[in-house]
């Protein structure tokens, strides 16, 4: 079955400034965003994720490369000619208009008949549960309500793609959790393709169908939240999403020999020096004498409530963090300096490209 | 309050100097207003309360004539200079920075810096040439001159408002299918209106009390209220001048208060 593609970026480059001082915010980025999916661009600030969003919206023109919407080249189309709408980080609600006028703005500009605009605005107000606020000025609304007006305003013209630029970053934690669910609901109800920009990995993991992880102007990996978390392709992706351990190793036959001398199996054909990664919750702590166990010494125990983080040192000095579920008594039964044996759950070890 | 560093109010003589400044600024104006209600002719000798000078000024056809001309001139100059200043402010804030932008900024504000008497003489000579060539003697010269020197007064508040505006709003309008014109008409202009009103009021007040340029540019029989008053004082000083001045003062204070209220209320 072939998936239709809503947005496609081909070898997109965006440079700011000229000559020697030019900064490449995007460096040869290609990505395909499927119709109807919740796609998240995830990365630290300055990685180029917002720039890519602004290129899709038409607020910036790429220095090179093309952008396609439903297969049509829109690279040079101005923003008002693109059937995509944006939810801005600052919401950018029009302060001189009411909530209803804000929501109807897009359709008004498109010259739709008054009755149609009115009906659509009412429908949108119901969708974001703001019917009683229709005639308020936007400054009289709370942050969460303004957020919902911004969403309704961007959804009202039924865009082919909805772009969301860190829309939840200004909200407090509780409201952010609510809005995450709300966004997911809206996306499922409307069936519109969402492209969501965030630096919050938890937000990305819980909401997205697929995630594109970005760093330094490049797309590092695209995949489902599970793929990104369990099979990171490189050090950046592995460390940016969740916590992880890095173990230097060398290819030895059809397995890898860790620097502490123990041989482990991992699904890869990479040769020479490699880095293995393993998540803290994928390691088991057993007795030092267990078969095939990695000998280690406990150096620190940190209690987090549900979890206890156990820091151990391998014989060669490599530090490894193991996450244990705290037992009912809260006492993990380990002591500082205790000799233990580490083992990995199946498929836990991943080999990184770099 | 933490007394860190330099605390002005603790310096010796602060109260005295502050009081002296306010007295110097406002006592003459206060006296002028008081004597406009004098029952006698004098502007220095109090002879009891009366509104007679307001009545006399109201009945004076020359005062009426000059007042109507002043208002007509100030309104025309305010409208023309505000339209031009709005365009100039848009041109200097809503585009990429270009070479010579600072120069243009200085040029727009030139009337604030050039001594007014220089502008007046220049306009006199310039308009004399046009008068000779066209034989036109009407109000156009005064309107043109006033519009020109009012531009910077209208320009500054409009520019300040444009610079303080959140540009994301215009981006959002474009994202919601507004053309450049629609963005201006439905987003930028409504948000700019308080600035435009403020600029227009400043221009109006500036034109209303101008003497130097008006004296040089006006033709015979084109007295404005300030030039009429100047002419009257040369002949004979009566409290009628005080009455007219007090009305002008009240009008100006009212307009500037409105200006303050409009510019204080940000977006």
Image: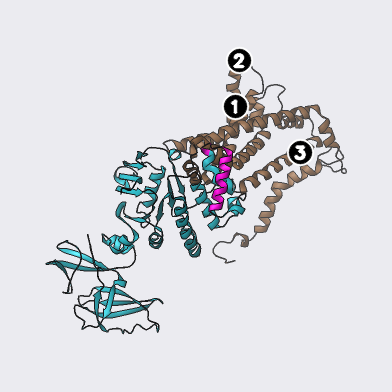
Chain colours: A cyan, B brown
- Which residue bears the numbered disc 3? B247
Q: Which of the labelled discs sits on residue B134, or is there none?
A: 2
Which one is closest to the eye, mark 1 or mark 3? Answer: 3
Q: Is A320 drawn above or below residue A158 in the view shown?
A: below
Q: Which of the labelled discs sits on residue B121, or is there none?
A: 1
Q: Which of marks 2 and 3 is nearer the N terminus?
A: 2
Q: Is B45 drawn above or below residue A149 in the view shown?
A: above
Span of residues in magenta:
A109-128
Observer-nearest residue: B130 or A344? A344
Which image quadrant: the C terminus of chain A? Answer: bottom left
How far across and how far down the image is residue A208, in percent? 39, 57
Q: Does the rendering let one see residue B156? A: no
Q: Which chain carries label 3?
A: B
Secondary structure category for the residue under label 3: helix
Secondary structure category for the residue under label 1: helix
Distance in Å between CA atoms under marks 2 and 3: 38 Å
Q: Earlier in the sequence, mark 1 or mark 2?
A: 1
Distance in Å between CA atoms under marks 1 and 3: 30 Å
How far across and how far down the image is residue B19, in percent? 69, 54
How far across and how far down the image is residue B115, in percent? 58, 34
């Amino acid at each position: 079955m072939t998936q239709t593609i809503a947005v496609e970026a081909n070898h997109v480059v965006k440079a700011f400034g000229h000559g020697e001082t030019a900064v490449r915010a995007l460096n040869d980025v290609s990505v395909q965003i499927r119709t109807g999916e919740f796609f998240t661009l995830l990365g630290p600030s300055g990685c180029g994720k917002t720039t890519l969003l602004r290129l899709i919206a038409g607020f910036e023109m790429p220095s090179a490369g093309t952008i396609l919407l439903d297969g049509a080249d829109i690279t040079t189309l101005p923003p008002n000619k693109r059937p995509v709408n944006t939810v801005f980080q600052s919401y950018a609600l029009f302060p001189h208009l009411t909530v209803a006028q804000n929501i109807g703005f897009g359709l008004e500009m498109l010259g739709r008949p008054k009755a149609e605009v009115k009906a659509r605005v009412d429908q949108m107000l119901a969708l974001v549960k703001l019917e009683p606020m229709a005639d308020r000025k936007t400054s009289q609304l709370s942050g969460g309500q303004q957020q919902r007006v911004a969403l309704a305003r961007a959804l009202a013209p039924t865009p082919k793609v909805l772009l969301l630029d860190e829309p939840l970053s200004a909200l407090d934690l509780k409201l952010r959790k609510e809005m995450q669910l709300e966004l997911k609901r809206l996306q499922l109800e409307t069936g519109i393709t969402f492209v969501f920009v965030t630096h919050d990995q938890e937000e990305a993991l819980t909401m997205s169908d697929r995630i594109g992880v970005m760093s330094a102007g490049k797309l590092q990996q695209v995949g489902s939240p599970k793929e990104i978390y369990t099979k990171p392709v490189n050090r950046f992706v592995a460390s940016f999403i969740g916590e992880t351990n890095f173990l230097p190793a060398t290819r030895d036959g059809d397995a890898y020999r860790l620097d502490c001398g123990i041989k482990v199996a991992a699904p890869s054909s990479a040769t020479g020096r490699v880095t293995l990664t393993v998540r803290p919750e994928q390691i088991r702590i057993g007795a030092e004498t267990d078969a095939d166990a990695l000998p280690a010494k406990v150096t620190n125990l940190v209690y987090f409530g549900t979890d206890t983080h156990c820091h151990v040192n391998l014989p060669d000095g490599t530090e490894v963090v193991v996450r244990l579920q705290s037992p009912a008594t809260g006492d993990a039964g380990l002591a500082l300096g205790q000799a233990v044996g580490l083992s990995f759950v199946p498929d836990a070890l991943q080999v990184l490209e770099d | 309050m933490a007394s860190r560093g330099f605390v002005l109010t603790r310096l010796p003589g602060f109260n005295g100097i502050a009081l002296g400044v306010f007295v110097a600024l406002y006592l003459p104006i206060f006296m002028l207003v008081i004597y406009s209600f004098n029952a006698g002719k004098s502007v220095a000798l109090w002879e009891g309360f009366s509104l007679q000078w307001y009545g006399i000024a109201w009945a004076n056809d020359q005062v009426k004539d000059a007042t109507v001309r002043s208002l007509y001139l100030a309104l025309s100059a305010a409208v023309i200079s505000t339209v031009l200043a709005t365009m100039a402010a848009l041109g200097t804030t809503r585009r990429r920075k270009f070479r010579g932008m600072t120069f243009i900024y200085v040029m727009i504000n030139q009337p604030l810096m050039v001594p007014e008497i220089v502008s007046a003489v220049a306009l006199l000579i310039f308009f004399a040439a046009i008068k000779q060539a066209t034989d036109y003697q009407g109000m156009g010269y005064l309107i043109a001159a006033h519009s020109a020197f009012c531009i910077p007064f209208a320009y500054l508040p409009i520019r300040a408002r444009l610079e303080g505006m959140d540009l994301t709003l215009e981006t959002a309008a474009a994202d919601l299918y507004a053309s450049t014109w629609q963005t201006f008409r439905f987003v930028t202009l409504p948000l700019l209106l308080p600035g435009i009103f403020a600029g227009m009021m400043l221009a109006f007040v500036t034109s209303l009390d101008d003497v130097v340029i008006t004296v040089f540019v006006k033709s015979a029989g084109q007295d404005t209220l300030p030039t009429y008053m100047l002419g009257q004082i040369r002949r004979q000083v009566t409290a009628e001048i005080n009455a007219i001045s007090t009305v002008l003062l009240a009008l100006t204070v009212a307009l500037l208060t409105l200006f303050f209220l409009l510019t204080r209320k940000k977006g």
